[in-house]
Image (spheres, rainbow, N blue to C red):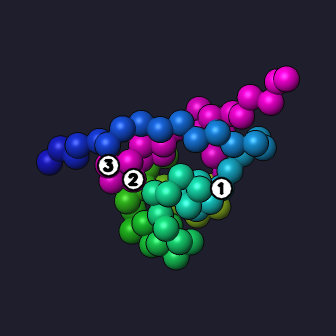
Amino acid sequence: MKVKLRGVRKIPIKGDYIKLDGLLKYSSVASTGGEAKYLIKAGEVFVCGVPCFERGRKLKPGDVVKCGSEVVIVDKTDVSG
């Protein structure tokens, strides 16, 4: 069964990392923390191609998160200027 992807989005973060449940909410993949927790515990979230069951997993720039048809790449915020 193939899943049609909506598109790949880069989500910029300010710090060195963002936790997985926070990224799902920040990127609007999940509307609430409860929904993010459910998606993670149900095995529907993949980090760099591997199923991830840890809500607090620290994601760093370059990590790729896939959930259903959503693909999000963690990107570093450019603070030059």
- Residue in the image at 65% along x and 55% along y: 19
**Which residues, given as a range, are shown in magenta?**
58-81
Q: Secondary structure at mark 2?
A: strand
Q: Which residue is mark 2?
A: 67
Q: Which residue is mark 1?
A: 19
- Residue in the image at 50% along x and 57% along y: 28
Horizontally, is 46 left or right of 19 in the view? left
* Label located before the other in sequence (1 or 3): 1
Mark toward the viewer: 1 or 3: 3
Q: Is residue 7 magenta?
A: no
**Furthest residue in direction top, as rendered:** 81
Q: Which residue is mark 3?
A: 69
Q: Secondary structure at mark 3?
A: loop
Horizontally, is 46 left or right of 1 in the view? right
- Residue in the image at 59% along x and 56% along y: 26
Q: Is residue 70 magenta?
A: yes
The amino acid pointed to by label 1 is Lys
